[in-house]
Image (spheres, rainbow, N blue to C red):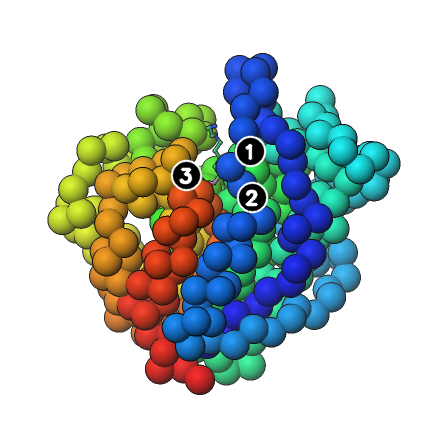
């Protein structure tokens, strides 16, 4: 399995987030990605490849030019240790800008696009391994550690060549991804996540959000109770997989967040490390060309073990 990776992510290093206006530790750290990369390599599950550079116009397919330029200019204008909270183009106070934010976020999109390209060139499974994550980033706004919506950029690119299903298994609902494709019938968005009446992003992810206009029926949300068992989680996952099967896509974009893990410091749905094999396996049984897109997961010490199980379930070792 190809693992698309670049060290540029380390340039994005926010000092803190604001929780109800109070500074608190920023869990979306560089080690997350490094730990996953080392673990997958140690288990011989893949080889690292570097991304191509795509023109910035690829971002304009899902984000407004005003938003992209704002982010770029603001980020470049900052000094080395600034941790800036803009008053515009943001949905919450969990996505500060730093000097390296634009370059890292742009590189994340390059990694997602490079992975998508490899699916078009015949790969069955590719892991686009990057940070910052993307699924909370909307067409005009950053939020929840996300700046550019990497899954959406990749899905949009793939949608020119076939039908695309996005399966989002991060602990948090991907409000940005949902919104970007909300009125479209050629890209299905299916998400399993913690009940948004209890957990971030609060504003969306309810079961009655199913799409609009032509997109009606092409958004599916499975909000989950915080004390869900693995057994019930698996049943919900199977429902989500049936939705995808019925849609009969050519490509699967998998927004893979590992913050559903039992010991995750900000998420935590009680899922154990071995259970990620079962999740991966169930998804593999769809037999779709699959692009793994990194979203959340903050239990740094265990992320490597989780990623190994997940990739093994997905059949990553059968690929060279
Ligand atoms: C990003 B992703 C705890 C509050 C956390 C923001 C969550 C962003 C999650 N300090 N709120 O979906 O993993
Ligand atoms: Zn998350």
Q: Position of residue 237 (x, y in %)?
A: 24, 52
Q: Is residue 70 above or below residue 215?
A: above
Q: Position of residue 319 (x, y in %)?
A: 41, 82
Answer left or right for 3 relative to 79. left
Q: Nearer the viewer, residue 315 or 139?
A: 315
Which residue appears at 31% of the width and 63% of the height? 309
Q: Nearer the viewer, residue 95 or 13?
A: 13
Q: Secondary structure at mark 1?
A: loop
Q: Are marks 2 and 3 in contact (CB under 8 Å)?
A: no
Q: Secondary structure at mark 2?
A: loop
Q: Is residue 250 visible?
A: no
Counting residues from the start of the chain, the first of labels 1 and 3 encountered is 1
Question: How many other residues sit within 10 Å of disc 1, few (<14), some (14-19) or many (≥20)?
Answer: some
In three-dimensional space, the C-alpha distance between marks 2 and 1, rounded to whole angstroms, equals: 7 Å
Q: Is residue 312 above or below residue 319?
A: above
Q: Position of residue 260 (x, y in %)?
A: 33, 44
Q: Is residue 53 visible?
A: yes
Q: Nearer the viewer, mark 1 or mark 3?
A: 1
Which residue appears at 40% of the width and 53% of the height? 303
Question: How many other residues sit within 10 Å of disc 3, few (<14), some (14-19) or many (≥20)?
Answer: many
Q: Is residue 166 above or below residue 281?
A: above
Residue pointed to by mark 2: 29
Q: Are marks 2 and 1 in contact (CB under 8 Å)?
A: yes
Residue pointed to by mark 3: 173
Q: Nearer the viewer, residue 173 or 145?
A: 145
Q: Is residue 36 above or below residue 51?
A: above
Which residue appears at 25% of the width and 46% of the height? 271
Q: For the C terminus, which image quadrant?
A: bottom left
Residue pointed to by mark 1: 26
Question: How many other residues sit within 10 Å of disc 2, few (<14), some (14-19) or many (≥20)?
Answer: some
């Amino acid at each position: 399995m190809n693992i698309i990776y670049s060290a540029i992510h380390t340039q994005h290093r926010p000092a803190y987030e604001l929780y109800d206006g109070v500074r608190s530790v920023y869990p979306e750290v560089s080690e997350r990605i490094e730990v996953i990369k080392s673990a997958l390599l140690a288990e011989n599950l893949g080889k690292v490849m570097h991304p191509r550079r795509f023109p910035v116009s690829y971002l304009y397919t899902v984000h407004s030019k005003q938003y992209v330029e704002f982010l770029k200019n603001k980020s470049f204008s900052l000094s080395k240790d600034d941790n800036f909270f803009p008053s515009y183009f943001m949905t919450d106070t969990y996505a500060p800008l730093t000097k390296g934010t634009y370059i890292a976020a742009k590189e994340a999109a390059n990694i997602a696009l490079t992975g998508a390209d490899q699916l078009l060139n015949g790969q069955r499974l590719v892991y686009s391994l990057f940070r910052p994550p993307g699924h909370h980033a909307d067409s005009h706004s950053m939020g929840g550690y996300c700046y550019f919506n990497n899954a959406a950029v990749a899905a949009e690119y793939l949608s020119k060549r076939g039908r695309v299903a996005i399966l989002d298994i991060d602990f948090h609902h991907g409000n940005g991804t949902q919104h970007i494709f909300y009125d479209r019938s050629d890209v299905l968005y299916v998400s399993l996540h913690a009940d948004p009446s209890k957990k971030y992003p609060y504003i969306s992810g309810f079961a009655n959000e199913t799409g609009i206009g032509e997109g009606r029926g092409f958004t599916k949300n499975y909000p989950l109770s915080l004390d869900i068992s693995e057994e019930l989680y698996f049943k919900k996952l199977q429902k989500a997989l049936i939705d995808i099967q019925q849609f009969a896509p050519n490509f699967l974009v998998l927004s893979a967040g590992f913050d559903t893990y039992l010991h995750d410091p900000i998420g935590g749905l009680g899922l154990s490390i071995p259970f990620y094999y079962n999740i991966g396996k169930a998804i593999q049984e769809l037999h779709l060309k699959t692009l793994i897109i990194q979203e959340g997961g903050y239990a740094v010490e265990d992320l490597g073990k989780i990623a190994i199980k997940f990739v093994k379930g997905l059949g990553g070792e059968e690929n060279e």
